[in-house]
Image (tube, rainbow, N blue to C red):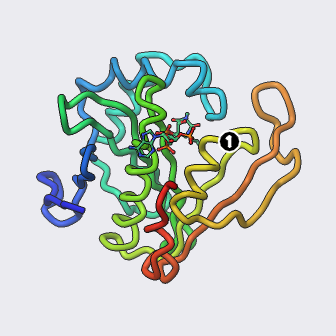
Amino acid sequence: MTINQSSRSGSIPVHFETPRLRVRPFVAADAGAFTAYRAHPDVERYQSWSDYTIEQGRALIDSMHDLLPGVPGQWYQFALEERQGGALIGDLALKVDGAEPSTAELGFTLAPEYQGNGYGLEAVRELLGYAFGTLHLRRLTAVTDALNYSAALLLDRVGMRREAYFHENIFFKGAWGSECAFAILDREWAAGCGAKQIR
Ligand SMILES: CC(C)(COP(=O)(O)OP(=O)(O)OC[C@H]1O[C@@H](n2cnc3c(N)ncnc32)[C@H](O)[C@@H]1OP(=O)(O)O)[C@@H](O)C(=O)NCCC(=O)NCCS
C-alpha cells in the first residue's frame, strides 16, 4: 500500500493506493458522479437510502470536508477512483465505534459499470490494511443484507468471518429483512487471512 500524508491533517493519511485504484477524500466536483451511482437501483437496493438526490450527495460530501478517518462515532467516506483516467468509481466507508474505539465497521460501494472487475475486492482488502496498519484498529466488522450475495462473497474473499445471521431483524424498504455480520481481528489479518486470493 502506498500512503501519502493528508494535506488537511498533516498526520492521519487519507490517501492510499492499490495497483489499479486510488483512495482519496471526496471533493465537491465528485457530487454528480457520486449521486448518479448512489441513485442507481442496483446500488441502493441493500443500502439505507432511496431516491438519492444531488442535494443529498452534495451535503454528504460537504459534511466530510472537515472530518478525518478514525474519529470515534463518525462515518468517514473515502472516494475511490481509477488510477488510469481518474474516474470516480465508488467509495469506501469506515466508522470507528464510539464506545469501543479499537473496533470499526466498514462499508463499500461501486458504481454498477465498474463492478465485476475485482475492484471491490482490491479496494476493501486495502481498506483492511489501512484500518489495521495505519489506524491500528483491533477488530473490523461489516453487516450485509442476507440477500446481498456479492457483498457477502467479497467479505468472505477478504478473509472476514461470518459471525452471525440475524433472522428478519430489520424492517427495511417495506419488508422484514435478514442480515449477516462479519468480522476480522488484527492478528488474523496479520496472519494472512487478508491475503486470500480470489481463486
Ligand atoms: C458489493 C460490491 C462492492 C462488489 O463489487 P465488485 O467489484 O463486483 O466485487 P469483487 O471485487 O468481489 O468482484 C469480483 C468479481 O469480479 C470478477 N473479476 C474480474 N476481473 C477480476 C480481477 N482482475 N480480479 C478479481 N476479480 C475479478 C470476479 O470473477 C468476480 O466475479 P464473480 O463474483 O462473478 O465471481 C458491488 O456489488 C456493489 O457496489 N454493490 C452495491 C452496493 C452494496 O451493496 N454495497 C455493500 C453494502 S454492505
Residue at position x 24%, y 45% in the image: 22
Coordinates of residue 103 in the picture (x, y in percent): 52, 70
- Front residue of 174/80: it is 80
Residue at position x 24%, y 50% in the image: 19
Residue at position x 42%, y 21% in the image: 35
Task: Tell me if residue 159 comes above or below residue 22 in the rendering.
Answer: below
- Front residue of 118/71: it is 118
Can the viewer see residue 24 in this picture? no
Residue at position x 24%, y 55% in the image: 16
Q: Quadrant of the N terminus?
A: bottom left
Q: Is residue 181 found left or right of 93 in the rendered image?
A: right
Q: Is residue 180 found left or right of 40 in the rendered image?
A: right
- Front residue of 194/187: it is 194
Can the viewer see residue 177 in this picture? yes
Task: Tell me if residue 192 comes above or below residue 39 in the rendering.
Answer: below
Residue tagged 1: 149
Task: Tell me if residue 182 comes above or below residue 110 in the rendering.
Answer: below
Circle 1: element type = helix
- Front residue of 147/117: it is 117
